[in-house]
């Protein structure tokens, strides 16, 4: 049986709207040869991300008529007329601020409180704009705020009591709330640049690791890239006059080192640290052990000592 919509064939990949990696395959309307909306598709990272929005689910959630683009129109296009580009939509302040509460039911906050204590956990959640979501019971929101103070996006995630992400429980606030076009992606924690003009910036992969590292290590402003593929020259531009240190996950040092050398040629004061990599076991490298895991293990060891 041939369906009206199919996942795009071939090797073309797009940026996943949830995990921000270039592992996203979009659905195509095979009769007219067009993509559906940008968030309709499947992430190939089925274990670590699991995002999959099917066409039927999208049309049900959005209320959009799936046959709208096929219907004849009485509108006549003016030759040479330019269609205005869709403007990015920032997260409404009331939505952002309304989430910064109810931490007692936020599993990620509870995890931080177990490691650092309640007061320190509240401080870290304030610094990094961590909210509480009703999308799943116990879920959190990692709010991305740029260096102009604009809330550009929110990543909804659910963690268990041990601080591990629950498979399949990750989504985008723009998608859930149907807010419209996402603004350009930037580093998580970018808003913290305004707190200190001299501190170097440390970049890790995940939001969780950035927050854990910030609670444990002094001397850096900790940020997260989301993935290596989304760490680009454009996203480093706000850090142009800063010292930058990359802290890759276990087993990824060489790739991050190559990226650092590329950025050096672009004029950035940047290097990749092997402080974590050189102390890992083969098993830890295979598991993608990161600096957040290292902090959590250190804190648990100090508590049991």
Image (cartoon, helix red, strand yellow):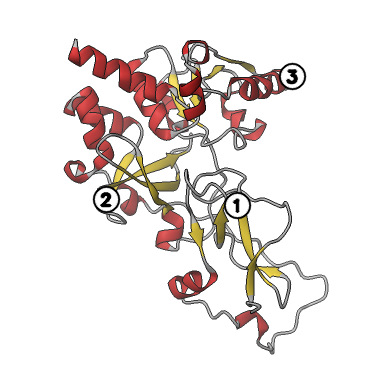
Residue 230 percent location from the top left of the image: 60, 37
Check whether the beta carbons of the residues at disc 1 and disc 3 lie within 8 A of each other. Answer: no
N-term mark: 1 or 2 = 1
- Inter-mark Cα distance, 1 to 2: 31 Å
Above or below residue 145? Residue 124 is above
- Inter-mark Cα distance, 3 to 2: 43 Å
Q: Using the image as rendered, state which of residue 53 and residue 71 is in the foreground.
A: 53
Q: Residue at x 38, y 32 (%)?
A: 208
Residue 165 percent location from the top left of the image: 36, 41
Residue underneath mark 1: 24
Q: Residue at x 54, y 49 (%)?
A: 183
Q: Secondary structure at mark 3?
A: helix
Q: Using the image as rendered, state which of residue 108 and residue 289 is in the foreground.
A: 289
Q: Using the image as rendered, state which of residue 219 and residue 3 is in the foreground.
A: 3
Residue 292 percent location from the top left of the image: 39, 25
Q: Residue at x 49, y 49 (%)?
A: 18
Question: Is 87 positioned to the left or the right of 124 in the image?
Answer: right
Above or below residue 280? Residue 135 is below
Residue 265 tag number:
3
Above or below residue 272? Residue 69 is below
Callout in the foreground (1, 3): 1
Residue 287 percent location from the top left of the image: 47, 29
Q: Is residue 193 visible?
A: no
Question: Is 200 positioned to the left or the right of 160 in the image?
Answer: right
| Quadrant of the snapshot with the N terminus | bottom right
Q: Is residue 221 visible?
A: yes
Q: Residue at x 76, y 79 (%)?
A: 77
The part of the image, by quadrant, that contains residue 217 is: top left
N-term mark: 1 or 3 = 1
Residue 98 tag number:
2
């Amino acid at each position: 049986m041939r369906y009206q919509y199919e996942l795009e064939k071939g090797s073309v990949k797009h940026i996943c709207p949830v995990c921000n990696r270039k592992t996203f395959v979009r659905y195509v309307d095979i009769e007219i040869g067009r993509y559906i909306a940008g968030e309709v598709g499947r992430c190939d990272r089925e274990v670590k991300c699991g995002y999959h929005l099917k066409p039927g689910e999208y049309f049900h959630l959005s209320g959009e008529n799936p046959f709208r683009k096929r219907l004849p129109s009485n509108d006549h296009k003016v030759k040479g007329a330019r269609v205005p580009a869709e403007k990015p939509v920032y997260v409404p302040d009331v939505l952002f601020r309304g989430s910064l509460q109810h931490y007692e039911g936020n599993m990620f906050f509870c995890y931080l409180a177990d490691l650092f204590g309640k007061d320190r956990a509240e401080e870290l959640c304030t610094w990094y704009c961590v909210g509480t979501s009703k999308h799943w019971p116990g879920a959190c929101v990692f709010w991305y705020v740029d260096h102009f103070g604009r809330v550009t996006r929110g990543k909804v995630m659910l963690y268990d009591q041990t601080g591990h992400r629950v498979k399949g429980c990750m989504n985008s606030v723009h998608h859930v709330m149907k807010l419209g076009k996402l603004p350009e992606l930037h580093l998580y924690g970018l808003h913290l640049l305004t707190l200190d003009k001299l501190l170097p910036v440390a970049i890790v992969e995940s939001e969780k690791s950035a927050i854990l590292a910030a609670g444990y290590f002094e001397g850096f402003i900790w940020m997260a890239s989301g993935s290596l593929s989304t760490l680009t020259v454009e996203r480093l531009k706000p850090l142009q006059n800063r010292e930058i240190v990359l802290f890759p996950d276990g087993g990824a040092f060489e790739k991050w080192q190559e990226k650092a050398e590329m950025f050096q040629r672009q004029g950035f004061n940047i290097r990749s640290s092997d402080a974590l990599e050189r102390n890992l076991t083969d098993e830890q490298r295979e598991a993608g052990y990161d600096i957040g895991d290292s902090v959590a293990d250190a804190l648990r060891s100090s508590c049991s000592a």
